[in-house]
Image (cartoon, rainbow, N blue to C red):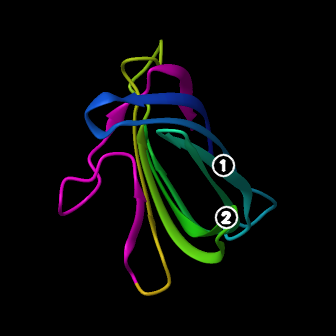
Amino acid sequence: MKYFLLAAAIACAPCGTAAAIDVSAKFTGGSENELRGNLSVSVQRGSDMVTFNTTELRALSVNGGAVSMTGVGSIAGFGDGYRFQLSAVDAGEPGAGRDTVAFTVWDASGALVLSTRWSGMHTDPVAISSGNLQSH
């Protein structure tokens, strides 16, 4: 059975954000087509808090320590229909300072809404500042 767990904090001083990420996802039952779980991301931007929650997980790929997840979710106060992609790497123990995560959200038109560290072309990975990632 493949699963992915992440409870972490990110402090990204260059991009002016702090984020808390909580993920639990796994394939259940006798078929690996049954994907269950949730993802919640809260991002602090100055005095504003943006909270994203999944409404549907569409794909989960676990390859050793590398994880990729996609789906759809909502942003508190702004509604549903936002697409997300999360990529993470479990680099061993301890997770803080070693494990990395890249999280991106787009609206229905494809416009970028949220990124842990946008390079201008894609979201670059950010090392977690606390917590741990486990993938199997």
Task: Mark 2 and mark 1 in contact? Answer it, CB < 8 Å.
Answer: no
Residue stretch in magenta? 110-136
| Quarter holding residue 52 | bottom right
Residue type for callout 1: Ser
- Answer above or below: position of 2 versus 70: above
What is the total number of numbered labels drawn onto the structure image?
Answer: 2
Q: Label 1, on which residue? A: 40
Q: Position of residue 80 (x, y in %)?
A: 67, 76
| 69 on left or right of 34 | left
From the viewer's side, name the closer residue of 123 and 15: 15
Q: Residue at x 33, y 35 (%)?
A: 126
| 46 on left or right of 28 | left
| Quarter holding residue 32 | bottom right
**Residue at the extreme right:** 29
Residue type for callout 2: Glu
Q: Mark 2 or 1 closer to N-term?
A: 2
Q: Label 2, on which residue? A: 32
Say what secondary structure mark 2 lies in: loop
